[in-house]
Image: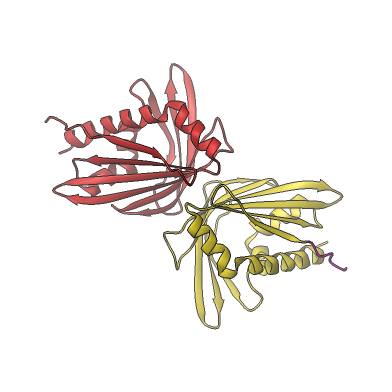
Chain colours: A red, B yellow
Amino acid sequence: MATRTHETEITADPDVPLVRIIREFDAPPEKVFRAHTDQALLAQWNRPRDTEMRIDHFDCRTGGSYRFIHIRAGDEFGFRGCFHEVRPDELIVQTFTFEGFPDGVALERLVFEDLGDGRTRLSTTSLVDSFEGRDAFLASGMEEGVRRCYERLDELLAAAR
Amino acid sequence: MATRTHETEITADPDVPLVRIIREFDAPPEKVFRAHTDQALLAQWNRPRDTEMRIDHFDCRTGGSYRFIHIRAGDEFGFRGCFHEVRPDELIVQTFTFEGFPDGVALERLVFEDLGDGRTRLSTTSLVDSFEGRDAFLASGMEEGVRRCYERLDELLAAAR
């Protein structure tokens, strides 16, 4: 049950204050989608390894909303947003805010693309309203965080095969 | 009960794909805010004069969502989104989509600023993910639409004084 390692491509758009993340997974779209929309699965991979994740609420449907908390060494970090659209196995459009910086709001778009042979390309864009905000987000170490989370997601998808 | 006419300032940001709308109203923030969050009031002003507005749902709170329909000459135009944050008398952050173009999503931020003497400055930004999308939005006649709606809002606020 070896997990092939995929590159996570993270790029800052040159024209608009947007980060683009592209990653392939060795699982079909419905499984990758489910790992994003089932809160018990999400809590297993969408956090650093040394961090607990507590879900306050997670109503993953068009018009729903969510809030979760990362807990590390007794410190709590809250994140929340609303689901603009959830299109099964295809698309999630949501907002995202770190509660430590409540006026920073990102508009995120996750596209699940079926590559055939049980593989999926997940393309995520995260749009904010200034280049300063976007570059601060990149400088915060999010790139390493995203790579690690996706490695955990690889493990989860491999175990569920 | 004469209504002073205020200018509606609409500008396209030069650096990011964002439209900025600034408008003053002769009413305090809590009244201008209420006209945006009370669906019966909203339906009175947030539509062209020759158009009916039917509200499908309007749950204006942090984590809520909305959908409304404009009806003109038998044609229906749906609009929907979710409320990322609703901070009473101060701020609304929401998403917005015209259902005729479901993949176009705007992140909107409405700031209600108390100018004293029963006056409010409302600053709205609408962020999308491309300059082409932003410019198409401006070319659609939205500017004239926004000005007309705000004139109706002036009338509503004057009548409620």
Task: Tell me, yes or no, if residue B22 can be seen here.
Answer: yes
Task: Name the image quarter holding residue A133.
Answer: top right
Which residue corresponds to the image point at 50% horizontal and 72% vertical from the top-left? B77
Instruction: Say if the magenta span includes residue B5.
Output: yes
Span highlighted in magenta in the image: B1-6
Q: Considering only vertical position in the picture, is B55 above or below A28?
A: below
Would residue A8 appear left or right of B80 to someone viewing this image?
left
Dividing the image into 4 quarters, which one contains the C terminus of chain B?
bottom right
Whole-percent x and y of residue B148? Answer: 69, 69
Whole-percent x and y of residue B138? Answer: 58, 63
Q: Considering only vertical position in the picture, is B134 above or below A74?
A: below
- Which residue occupies the foreground of this view, B58 or B92? B92
Would residue A62 appear left or right of A100 to someone viewing this image?
left
From the image, give the main secondary structure of the stretch colored magenta: loop
Instruction: Say if the magenta span includes residue A108.
Output: no
Which residue corresponds to the image point at 63% horizontal and 79% vertical from the top-left? B50
